Image (cartoon, rainbow, N blue to C red):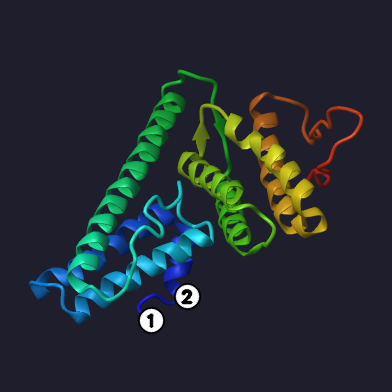
Amino acid sequence: MRYDEAVVDRVRNDPLKELPRICEEAMQAVQPSGGWNARSHAILVEAYAFLMSLDDAGLVPGGFAGKGTIQVVGNHSNEGQQIAALLGALATKFRQQTETLQFESIKAQYAAALGKAFSFEFSQGDLDRVQALINELRKLLTETPGFEDSHRRRLLLRLERLQAELHKRMSDLDHFWGLVGDAGVALGKLGENAKPLVDRFAEIVNIVWRTQAKAEELPSGASLPQLGHDTSVRLPPQDKT
């Protein structure tokens, strides 16, 4: 197999960087052949099958629009042209998604730096921990059974956006508070099986709360409020050290 567990891990950790590379490397591998021979056909078919498997695992942001549309029956020329065209379209789509996220990230950085909006500042340790937790959540989402594919993709895309927006100084933290709802939905769908996910959602929320409380000049050690008489997601106690 051309794609081993190391490739899967890279896709899991940074899908919008790795997916275009997979598409482009497959297309580049067949260009020198000058035709659709058995070798070039095999390379394209394996890339196509790998991308479909990644999509089944929820690792393709936005889904795989061309999934299953090409029937692989051994017609090298016809299938090669179709798969190459599809890989080219997917590579373009992934690049555009990356550029959109980068643009939003740059805007957010300038907004915080210029004081256009109230800014929040993470410590380097908290920033590194949130990054690590997002990576852990992405892996858990792909490995935990019980999620509908569409729900899994939405959560993975949210994490991708959060990671792209995460910087030491941020103009707002609104997107991070949506994780409370995500944790509640996961708990409702999976019950006790959701605990590893909920624990990580909760740790991110607690870090965000500490950062916001500090910026708002709340008393040291202020606890994250529990709203309402009952909550489906119980966040762990605050670390007051």
Q: Amino acid at mark 1?
A: Met
> What residue does disc 2 label?
5
- The image quarter containing residue 183 is top right
**Identity of the residue furthest to the right in this view:** 229
Q: Position of residue 77 (x, y in %)?
A: 17, 69
Give above or below for 118 relative to 178: above
Residue in the image at 10% along x and 72% along y: 35
Q: Position of residue 201 (x, y in %)?
A: 69, 47
Of 46 and 60, nearer the camera is 46
Q: Position of residue 161 (x, y in %)?
A: 49, 41
Residue 86's label in the rendered image is none
Residue in the image at 23% along x and 73% along y: 75
> What residue does disc 1 label?
1
Q: Amino acid at mark 2?
A: Glu
Residue in the image at 38% along x and 81% along y: 1
Q: Residues within 10 Å of mark 1 (few under 14, many from 20)?
A: few
Using the numbered discs, state the Cα–Cα distance from disc 2 to disc 1 in whole angstroms.
10 Å
Looking at the rendered structure, the secondary structure element under dot 1 is loop
Front: mark 2 or 1 = 1
137 sits left or right of 41 in the view: right
Give above or below for 11 relative to 236: below
Q: Residues within 10 Å of mark 2 (few under 14, many from 20)?
A: few
**Identity of the residue furthest to the left in this view:** 34
Give above or below for 193 relative to 105: below
- The image quarter containing residue 216 is top right
Do residues under tags 2 and 1 come within 8 Å of each other at their CB atoms?
Answer: no
46 sits left or right of 120 in the view: left
Of 35 and 30, nearer the camera is 35
20 sits left or right of 156 in the view: left
Looking at the rendered structure, the secondary structure element under dot 2 is helix
Residue in the image at 32% along x and 64% along y: 22
